Image (cartoon, rainbow, N blue to C red):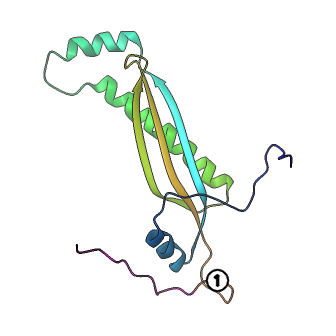
């Protein structure tokens, strides 16, 4: 069987637990799929040199902070774009991972979550208002 580019099947994956999945459905939301946003930011040799000098003093390293904010926003925007392409209303269970590569000169930021769409209740949908969270005590 040959799969054509752009094919979108009905199956999906999610990082939600079974209880989280039930609570989402119970409240009238339909999980649409796993969405990911990613970017790799170069922090540049000049910035590394500047930060190296500033590292000898107290205070925030604003250059790194600004880069991390920019990279995070870009990854989140890309994740939200994927959710929009699925017709989702939002993203739940979002997780952000930051990894440094190439002798700490590059920063990879990955945002992962589950896209959901509100579908409400109806005769062909699961009942709502019955979900419970169970916390193990042992």
Element marked by disc 1: loop
Q: Is residue 131 above or below residue 14?
A: below
The one nearer the camera, 77 or 20, is 20
Check disc 1: other Cα within 10 Å, few if <14, some if 14-19, many if 20+.
Answer: few
Report whether 21 appears left or right of 11.
left
Position of residue 99 measured from the top left corner of the image (x, y, whole percent): 40, 32
Tell me if residue 91 comes above or below residue 103 in the rendering: below
Percent coordinates x, y for residue 79 in the rendering: 55, 47
Which of the 4 quarters of the picture holds residue 116? bottom right
| Magenta highlight: main SS | loop
Q: Quadrant of the C terminus?
A: bottom left
What residue is drawn where x is 50% and y is 75%? 22
Span colored in magenta? 127-138
Q: Is residue 106 left or right of residue 127?
A: left
Residue 40 locus on image (x, y percent): 50, 28
Q: Is residue 102 above or below residue 69?
A: above
- Residue drawn at x 84%, y 45% as measured from the top left: 4
Is 54 situated left or right of 8 in this image? left
Q: Is residue 133 magenta?
A: yes
Q: Which residue bears the numbered disc 1? A: 125
Residue 70: in magenta span: no
**Along the viewing direction, whichever of 46 and 137 lies nearer the viewer:** 137
């Amino acid at each position: 069987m040959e799969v054509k580019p752009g094919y979108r099947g009905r199956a999906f994956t999610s990082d939600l637990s079974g209880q989280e999945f039930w609570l989402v459905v119970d409240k009238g939301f339909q999980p649409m799929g796993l969405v990911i946003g990613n970017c790799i930011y170069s922090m540049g040799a000049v910035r590394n040199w500047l930060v190296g000098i500033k590292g000898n003093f107290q205070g925030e390293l604003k250059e790194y902070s600004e880069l991390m904010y920019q990279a995070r926003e870009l990854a989140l925007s890309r994740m939200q774009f994927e959710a929009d392409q699925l017709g989702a209303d939002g993203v739940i269970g979002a997780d952000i991972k930051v990894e440094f590569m190439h002798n700490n000169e590059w920063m990879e930021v990955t945002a992962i979550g589950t896209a959901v769409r509100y579908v409400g209740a109806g005769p062909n949908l699961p009942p709502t208002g019955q979900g419970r969270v169970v916390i193990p005590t042992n």
